[in-house]
Amino acid sequence: MTIRLGLLGGTFDPIHRGHLDVAVAARDALALDRVLLMPAHVPPHRTQAPRASGYHRFAMVARAIAGHDRLEACDLELRVDGPSYTSVTLARLGARGFGPTQLFFITGADAFAEIATWHDYPALLDASHFIVISRPGHDHEHVRERLPALADRFVEVAPGRNNRIVAELVRPAVFLVEATTSAVSSTEVRKRIEGGAPLDELVPAGVLDHINRHRLYAPMTTPADVLHDED
Ligand code: ATP
Ligand code: MG
């Protein structure tokens, strides 16, 4: 039996409960052996640089996954300068011996709806399976409408199915998983911190501790905060 490796890319600025829900839903629906949470160095689709450095974003991912089986923090994209293109990351994994049907690139439905704008589309769809997890306000119907050319690749998978058989297709597919994930975004988390609003349960306790300890995302209030400025 060959390994099935899940990859969840993102800015993770900061990581929140929704990201963990996505990783767990993908892991359980497709019986993934490992899921790597991979902060992007410079996300290609953003005009603004991430607020927290790659070091802090990686540290928060590492704290968030504590206690979650088969989730790992991965620095593959952070170790390469410049934009983190998924197609380049998949090619690097291919060069390390992973076949396209061993790789499962995971996105939320909002991100996958934009896949036609990604570098190396549509070729990158042949480099890996994709797992698309529904997100509050972003359903799979919208994904299907936006991407009619991909109709023959879509495979619906029930959440929590632990589906090994479907995952052993010979051609890369796009798996659609209808899961319940927390209605939260990193943008909302940052706004709450800036506005002094409580975070409630939006981020795991370890992430909250990391944010508070290092005063991430807060308005600058003391001279020591220049420590977090870009050079
Ligand atoms: P931002 O508000 O900065 O865009 P975000 O919450 O969307 O942050 P990203 O780092 O952009 O987080 O997301 C990484 C991946 O996780 C994307 O594929 C995104 O669709 C997915 N994702 C994030 N939050 C959720 C969620 N609550 N439900 C489903 N998918 C999510
Ligand atoms: Mg986003």
Image (tube, rainbow, N blue to C red):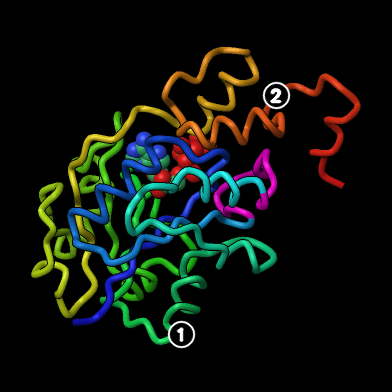
Is residue 99 within the magenta segment?
no
Is residue 47 within the magenta segment?
yes
- CA distance for labels 1 and 2: 40 Å
Tell me if mark 2 has few (under 14), some (14-19) or many (20+) residues whose alpha carbon lies within 10 angstroms of its own. Answer: some
**Residue kind at label 1, given as amino acid type:** Arg
Instruction: Name the magenta segment's main secondary structure.
Output: loop
Where residue 57 sits in the image (x, y, percent)? 60, 47
Task: Tell me if 139 is positioned left or right of 116 in this view.
Answer: left
Residue name at image x 33 percent, y 50 percent: 23
Where residue 211 sits in the image (x, y, percent)? 63, 32
Where residue 162 sits in the image (x, y, percent)? 13, 58
Task: Tell me if 36 is positioned left or right of 62 in this view.
Answer: left
Residue name at image x 24 percent, y 40 percent: 142
223, 148: nearer the viewer: 223
Residue name at image x 47 percent, y 43 percent: 64
Task: Tell me if 215 is positioned left or right of 121 in this view.
Answer: right
Asked which secondary structure carries label 2, the reply is loop
**Residue kind at label 2, given as amino acid type:** Ala
**Which residue is labeled 2 in the image?**
218
Asked which secondary structure carries label 1, the reply is loop
125, 182: nearer the viewer: 182
State which region is magenta: 42-55
